[in-house]
Amino acid sequence: MARSSKSVARTLEDLTLDSGYGGAADSFRSSSASLCCSEAHGGNHWHLTDSMHSRHNSLDTVNTVLVEDAEILESTGQCAKLPELEDVPWNLGEVASALNRDEEMTLPTPPQDVLLRLSVLVSRALVRVAKESQRLSLRYAKCTKYEIQSGIKMVLSWSVSMSCISAALGALSLYNMSTEEDKFGRGKSVRCGLIFNVGKFFKWMVDSRVAVRIHEHAAIYLAACMESLFREVYARVLRSALLERDNGIPKFTVEILEQAVNTDSEIWGSLQPWQHLICGKNASGEL
């Protein structure tokens, strides 16, 4: 079964590869890593593989569905899952601070179990954005803010992606306007006006091999995007009719968080564990 799930993951991963990157990308594929899951050591882990192989610049139609994979999908009715991240470039304290940053959402901090579940959900969107950014970075073997921006637009719905990109543009503008004295007296996160640590995101991108070279602006974009996405999901949960209130104070539970996400068509698919989903539902909430 382990071999079957790996082959399905490889097939779905190959569907995202573009055959038109050219020879420079082929040389990078042969020695690069990809973001995929593993069942080693009793669970799914983020690890590096050499699965981004060259297709020899062929423009012919490639049948990426193997016979054994088709039989597996028909018999089990399941698709490959995203890897569950063991280490994320944020902690629950930073998440709580980011959620209470806006003046209109000065509410009691949600319980730890709710913050932990919210972190798991948003980490799936992080994996999706990283995978798309990695694919887009193949041509020049470099990840910049443009690859992150394109990945955000591909993975998230239009309204959510515009909100995240606006936050990223604001953070980068603050960073570029900082003075020479700020470079030595304040960290990048403070200069960007962010709660999340930009250095952690840069290190995470390097360790995850998103690209051979990673520009610092890409880390700023990704950190600002994830921080904005946390607030976006939190705001949608607050606006949900499912959220119970006690004297105007919302009563957060993991079940309410899950139900609010499941009934929101714009964020549902991006926060699910299945690799093939992005938004996943239409405006009526139907699959």
Image (cartoon, grey):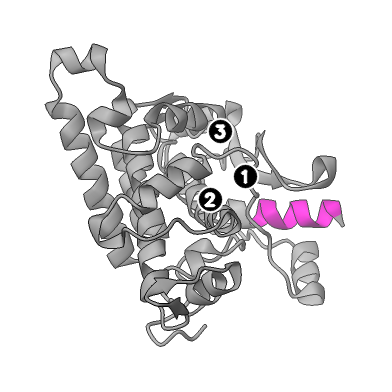
- Label 2 vs label 1: CA separation? 7 Å
- Percent coordinates x, y for residue 27 in the rendering: 52, 27
Q: Does residue 75 appear to the left or right of 158 in the view shown?
A: right
Q: In which quarter of the view is residue 214 placed? A: top left
The answer to the question of whether label 3 and label 1 lie on touching residues, with beta carbons closer than 8 A, is no
- In the rendered image, residue 185, in percent from the top left (x then y), is placed at 25, 14
Crowding at mark 1 (Cα within 10 Å: few <14, some 14-19, many 20+): some
Picture disc at residue 85: 1
Cβ atoms under marks 2 and 1 closer than 8 Å: yes
Cα separation, mark 3 vs mark 1, equals 11 Å
Counting every numbered tag in the picture gives 3
Which residue is label 2 attached to? 123
State the extent of the magenta-drawn residues as a range: 2-11
- The crowd level at tag 2 (other Cα within 10 Å; few <14, some 14-19, many 20+) is many
Does the segment drawn in magenta span residue 7? yes
The residue type indicated by label 3 comes to Ser
Query: Quarter of the image containing the N terminus?
Result: bottom right
- Residue at horizontal 53%, vertical 52%? 119
Q: Is residue 151 above or below residue 222?
A: below
The answer, for residue 74, to whether it is visible in the render is: yes
